[in-house]
Amino acid sequence: MQRITIQTRDGQCPSYVYRPSGRGPWPAVLVFMDALAIRPAMLEIGERLSANGYFTLLPDLFYRSGPYEPMDPKKVFSDPEQRRILMEKFRAPATTANIMSDTASFLDFIAAQPDVKPGPIGVTGYCWGGMLSLSAAGTFPERIAAAASFHGGGLATDAPDSPHRLAAKIRARVYVAGASEDASFPDDMKARLAQALTEAGVEHKIETYPARHGWVFRDTPVYDAAGAERHWQSLLALLAATLAY
């Protein structure tokens, strides 16, 4: 793993680069973190993707708020004050518009790497990052071939920047995994997203895992080992099917 900074419109974004062993070039994946910020469990996503042969970029999307200590997900899940600080200090400046502006810089960085295969990349995201993953697929359709969302919330809302509104622009294959216990992605929202993707002719699959919101990460109180492994198999299958160019 290599820690770097990427220049964006709004400043310097600390980011983590993971390169597979051996010689490239390799297909690339951009990871959108969850709202619990960068921490060891989040970094493990990059490690496993690179172990499976993908050049991986994991940017710290909270850079606008300045340096911070790794958060304790258990405290964030259980303490309303911790959640308030998280939302007001870190999430508020990280609007979808701001992150899509950042994403242009992330994609340019990836494209400039000599050990990355030319062509579209894959994106995956978790929680809030799942929404960003689909937003990126609709914002940069020519540059993204696969988009995954795991326990993502707010994927089809009345908000003007809801990602389902970009369905007509998406060219990527889309995979969405929701949780059976998740107020941020209820059944009616799943149906609304599915309708938008279907009407737009987007190749997609939406599944519901028997888990709670946030199940992928081992440091959360809702971690589900079987669901986390199922997430890996689904993600790697999506990438293998779309990035074999």
Image (tube, rainbow, N blue to C red):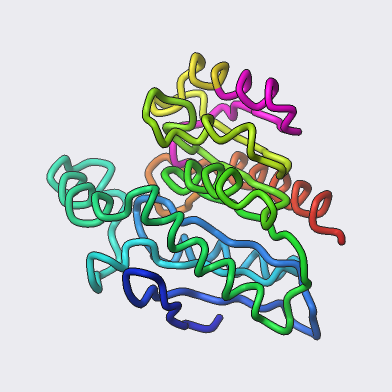
Towards the viewer: 111 or 92: 111
Residue 194 counted in the magenta span: yes
- Which quarter of the picture shows residue 114? bottom right
Which residue is located at x 67 percent, y 57 percent? Answer: 143
> Residue 126: image x %, image y %?
49, 47
Residue 138 counted in the magenta span: no
- Side of 172 relative to 242 (left or right): left
Up the image or down, 109 lies above or below 226; here it is: below
- Side of 185 relative to 231 (left or right): left
Number of labels in the image equals 0
Which residue is located at x 48 percent, y 38 percent? Answer: 152
- Side of 65 relative to 215 (left or right): left
- Which quarter of the picture shows residue 40? bottom left
- Which quarter of the picture shows residue 207? top right
> Residue 77: image x %, image y %?
28, 42
Q: Which of the image's four quarters has the C terminus?
A: bottom right
Up the image or down, 11 lies above or below 127; here it is: below
Which residue is located at x 23 percent, y 71 percent? Answer: 66
Q: Which of the image's four quarters has the N terminus?
A: bottom right
Up the image or down, 131 lies above or below 195; here it is: below
Q: Which residues are magenta?
A: 193-214
> Residue 88: image x %, image y %?
17, 49
In the picture as drawn, the residue positioned furthest to the left comes out as 81
Which residue is located at x 48 percent, y 47 percent? Answer: 132
Up the image or down, 238 lies above or below 20; here it is: above
